[in-house]
Image (cartoon, rainbow, N blue to C red):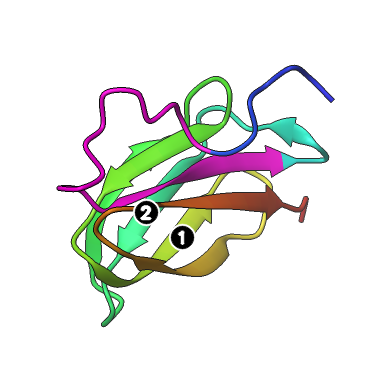
Amino acid sequence: MCGATRGGPSLDGVDLDKQSVIQGIVTKEGEPVGNAYVRLLDSTGEFTAEVPTSATGQFRFFAAPGQWTLRTLAPRVQPVDRQVQAQRGSAVDVEVTLETV
């Protein structure tokens, strides 16, 4: 395993009293996956946002409180959907594990 930090990016400078944060890390075979894409879908499945993962596999969204779906996409892997519940005042940390097709 590499020395990557588990979970999402550092929350230094993020005011969780005013924000709902969904963040995490994308891994495959125990290693971070850079340049994967994580989509944020609302409760009806409608596309809201998309971010690439960092070189260390991390991503972050600032989202309204409520139910969301994270859809993770990368070459030669099956897409992975994860349901998350965002709440103001806390960060949801998600680890998404990709599997080769």
Residue 10: in magenta span: yes
Q: Is disc 1 placed on a helix, strand or loop?
A: strand
Residue flagged by tag 2: what amino acid is it? Arg
Residue at 58% x, 60% y: name it: 79
Q: Is residue 98 left or right of residue 92?
A: right
Whether label 1 touches label 2, CB < 8 Å: yes
**Residue 94, percent across and down?**
55, 52
The image's mark for residue 35 is: none
Residue 97 is one of the magenta-drawn residues: no
The span shown in magenta is: 8-27
**Is 22 in front, or is 69?**
22
- On the rendered structure, is 6 left or right of 72? right
Whether 17 is drawn above or below 7: the answer is below
* Number of numbered markers: 2
Residue 41 x %, y %: 31, 66
Look at mark 2 in the image and give the residue it sits on.
Answer: 39
**Above-or-below relation of 28 to 79:** above
Query: Given the image, on which type of amino acid does mark 1 rest?
Result: Arg
Q: How many other residues sit within 10 Å of disc 1, few (<14), some (14-19) or many (≥20)?
A: some
Where's residue 1, x and y in %?
84, 25
